[in-house]
Image (spheres, grey):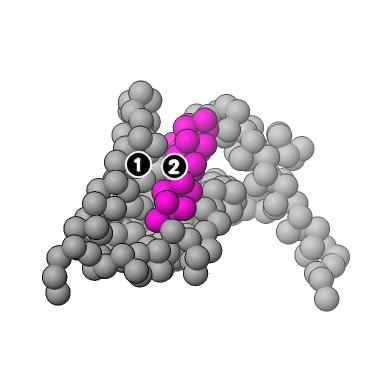
Amino acid sequence: MGKRGPYAKGLARREEIVARGLEVIAAEGYSGASVHRIASAAGLSKTGLLHHFDSKEQLFTEILRKRDEVDDPGLDELSAQLADLESAYVRIVQRNADIPGLVELFTRLSIEAADPEHPAHEFFSRRDRDLGERVARTIERATADSGRLPASAKTMALLLLAATDGLQLRWLRDPELDMAGTLTVLFELFEHAIADGAARPE
């Protein structure tokens, strides 16, 4: 049975606030995304918004959680190939290049969340673990018939995710940086290393 009454209305209101927050950041950038501005976009006072979220950091964490739902690569870990993984991540960084405010929000919050007491710490820790495991499973399955991997699938996944996060940080400083093209080169290196491993005798 679905949730009803005030609890369901509260959840719906939170989702609406997060959606408006995404829109504000996409349209006005990170610097324009004050709690007051997001509250206004959601038809609330600042006090009314903070009734649903304990702090600005908690609100921003939920905005990133929603962004991850939108950005999910949607890969079938049982059938995806390395080319599918490449296409998914190139597509994500190309889309992110159109919304620098969200890239800045992710980068700033991820740095602040290194503090275990930060409201976003658990979100980033879980995200790193879960996304890393999903990507590793995809790599392992996609390369199962290609010979030996140049490193463990887990290590290759870590390299991909670290490269993606690092490229976005550098892109904020240098918007001329070709994130998609650089990721493509990384995948070419993966493919060459896998092919080389397959060619070597056991």
Q: Residue at x 34, y 69 (%)?
A: 145
> Type of residue at label 2?
Val
Element type at mark 1 = helix
Question: In the rendered image, which quarter contains the N terminus?
Answer: bottom right
Residue 190: horizontal and vertical position, in percent? 27, 53
Q: Quadrant of residue 141?
A: bottom left
Element type at mark 2 = helix
The one of 22 and 57 positioned closer to us in this rendering: 22
Q: Main secondary structure of the magenta part?
A: helix
Q: Residue at x 26, y 67 (%)?
A: 147
Residue 67: horizontal and vertical position, in percent? 56, 47
Q: Can you say whether 35 is above or below 16 in the image?
A: above
> Is 39 part of what is drawn in magenta?
no
Which one is earlier in the sequence, the residue at label 1 or at label 2? 2
Q: Is residue 34 left or right of residue 164?
A: right
Q: Label 2: which residue?
A: 90
Q: Can you say whether 166 is above or below 149 in the image?
A: above
Q: Quadrant of residue 74?
A: bottom right
The one of 199 and 118 positioned closer to us in this rendering: 199
Assess whether mark 2 and mark 1 are in contact (beta carbons under 8 angstroms). yes
Q: Label 1: which residue?
A: 184
